[in-house]
Image (tube, grey):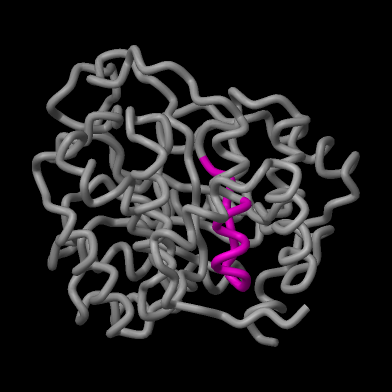
Amino acid sequence: MNIKIRNNWTFDEIKEIYHLPMVDLVFKAMEVHREFHDPKKMKISTLISVKTGACVEDCSYCAQSSKYHTGIDHSTMTVEEVVESAKQSKENGVSRVCLSASWRKVPNDKQFENILQMVHQVKELDLNVCCTLGMISVEQAKKLADAGITAYNHNLDTSENYYSKIVTTRKYSDRLETLNNLMTAEVPTCTGGIIGLGETEDDRISMLHTIATLDKHPYTVPFNTLVPIAGTPMEDRPLVPVWDMVRMIATARIIMPETIVCLAAGRSEMSDESQALCFMVGANSIFVGAKLLTTPNPNYEHDMGLLKILGINNIDLNKEMKN
């Protein structure tokens, strides 16, 4: 195959791919995936919530917003607690740790200095480290890069057109500005979204179009299915069909061949067969652990058992990043 990496996709081109007959979409995505990735390798990551809850944002899907009553307690981890958690994750075969904090934007104070210490010390464990801390400046991104992060996550969540329906405390342009700041600082980006928020298929395609036409494709694109949480405005939203996620992952794989595609939140509601199909069409990263921030995640042993059945092994990201 002679596949070129493109950043000039049109909305209509992506829409045509997204709406291919499922058998054709799956076949094409599998071809592209095998051209650029080893289908028998999976990136195994874990998420450590450094600061949980008390967020000033009003994201209508999120249990951590202070605007809603979801029963989530506010807590903050110390540097020592994060390092110990990372050590345990490494013993379980994890190769990448993502540090999360429920901030609107990264503060310039002792809290950020602690994050830099966490990144440095976890990196010394021979683990890759990513962060998701909210909006960030170029200068802060450069400091994180100097500390040794692999990538920085800042999801677009949905399309620009639908964004104001789920978040009012920030603008879509704020999201894009953060991604631009990261690219200016030469920090690899991790950006994806959530399906099941009440968006249309065109909203999903629009989000894919925005991501695929960034100046540089993200290092990782995570896709989440909404996990309805009691107390949030989205608590009564129905679960999305697995075929919707398959279309998202397959389309992303075709239009961003080199990118790592992560099957993130919502796996606990998916069958083994559903997850396997997502892996086959291009998802080559998962998060392991009892929870993804505040939402349930499959049992670690069950995940490893499924990967063993499929003949998929954990990839050593440290070796990968050096090649």
Confirm whether residue 92 shows in the render.
no
- Answer above or below: position of 100 versus 150: above
Comparing 229 with 146, the one in front is 229
Magenta region: which residues? Answer: 250-264
Residue pictured at 71% horizontal, 25% vertical = 271
Residue 1 as seen in the image, left or right of residue 111: right
Q: Is residue 257 magenta?
A: yes
Comparing 44 with 255, the one in front is 255
| Residue 35: image location, x then y, percent | 77, 72
| Residue 266: image location, x then y, percent | 53, 31
Comparing 199 with 156, the one in front is 199
Total labels: the figure holds: 0
Q: Quadrant of residue 190?
A: bottom left
Quadrant in which the N terminus is drawn: bottom right
Residue 146 as seen in the image, left or right of residue 25: left
Residue pictured at 64% horizontal, 26% vertical = 270
| Residue 7: image location, x then y, percent | 44, 77
Quadrant in which the C terminus is drawn: bottom right
Q: Is residue 57 magenta?
A: no
Confirm whether residue 153 shows in the render.
yes
